[in-house]
Amino acid sequence: MPRGFFITFEGLDGSGKTTQLRRLATALEAQGHSVVTLRQPGGTPLGDRIRSILLDSKSEAALGPIAPLAELALMFADRAQAIAQIIEPALAAGSIVLCDRYTDSSEAYQGGGRQLGSEPVLALHQAVCSNLQPDLTLLLLPALKSSLRRARNRNQRHIQAEGTDENRFERESDDFYRRIYEKYEEIAAREPHRVVAFRDDATIEQIHAQIKNTVTARLVPAHAL
Ligand code: TMP
């Protein structure tokens, strides 16, 4: 059984990565591939609990301010569980794993946004994730302004439709998001083979086509589309 292929999606809130992940999963499944999808934080029962602590804007009213390093450590606790419970077994079974956010998010949000720097993030990745790297990372990086507008609209709709509030990060300042954006740029420049950035403000369909081309070119022949 050949080992599977690990693809992560990255970008700011509102970058459209979740829509693109679903579109790619459907396309790959239609080609007969076994596809496993998950998101971070979350995706396992433990991870879903961690997600609600980290994303609910009411958490800090109940728990007090969450220290940036505690936030980082919780992101990695979630990730370690997802690797053990979902990602490694799926790769061993030959599946294509599509993960909505991974360690680049910790580097961008906690390293950049919270100003912890890249070093503790990369050290934790080494220690807690056995340095498991994606085979390919699809980074959706449309202009910062349009991403912010979409993220803020989306969260209002989420609260109205579902009554759940995953607003803890979206309440942050534009400067916080600028630092995240810059850190994503830095990661893309540092690892150009792994990270492919999509910067156009193109339609969902156009980006989907570009993503499919990129994935087709990277999949080993055993997984070819
Ligand atoms: P999303 O599932 O809507 O993308 O939201 C997840 C939020 O959690 C998003 O604001 C980014 C944040 N996040 C981090 O700050 N660090 C991380 O390591 C991960 C995975 C997510």
Image (spheres, helix red, strand yellow):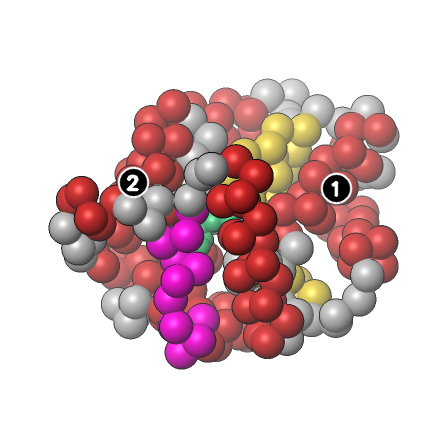
Q: Residue at x 76, y 41 (%)?
A: 23
- Residue sitting at x 28%, y 52%: 72
Q: Which residues are magenta?
A: 166-177
Residue 56 percent across, percent down from the top left: 35, 45
Q: Which mark is residue 24?
A: 1
Please, what secondary structure does the residue beneath circle 1 have? helix
* Nearer-the-camera pick, 157 or 200: 157
Note whether ligand 1 is within 8 Å of mark 1. no
Looking at the image, do the residues carrying marks 2 and 1 touch, with CB atoms under 8 Å apart? no
Compare residues 94 and 9 and report the one nearer the observer. 9
Work out how far the residue at label 2 is from the one at label 1, CA to CA, in angstroms. Answer: 29 Å
Is residue 87 shown above or below 40? above
Q: Is residue 125 magenta?
A: no
Inspect the image, locate mark 1, and give the three-letter code of the amino acid beneath it. Answer: Leu
Residue that mark 2 sits on: 53
Describe residue 158's horizontal placement relative to residue 121 as left or right: right
Give percent across and percent down for residue 75: 33, 46
Mark positioned earlier in the residue sequence (2 or 1): 1
Q: Determine the secondary structure under disc 2.
A: helix
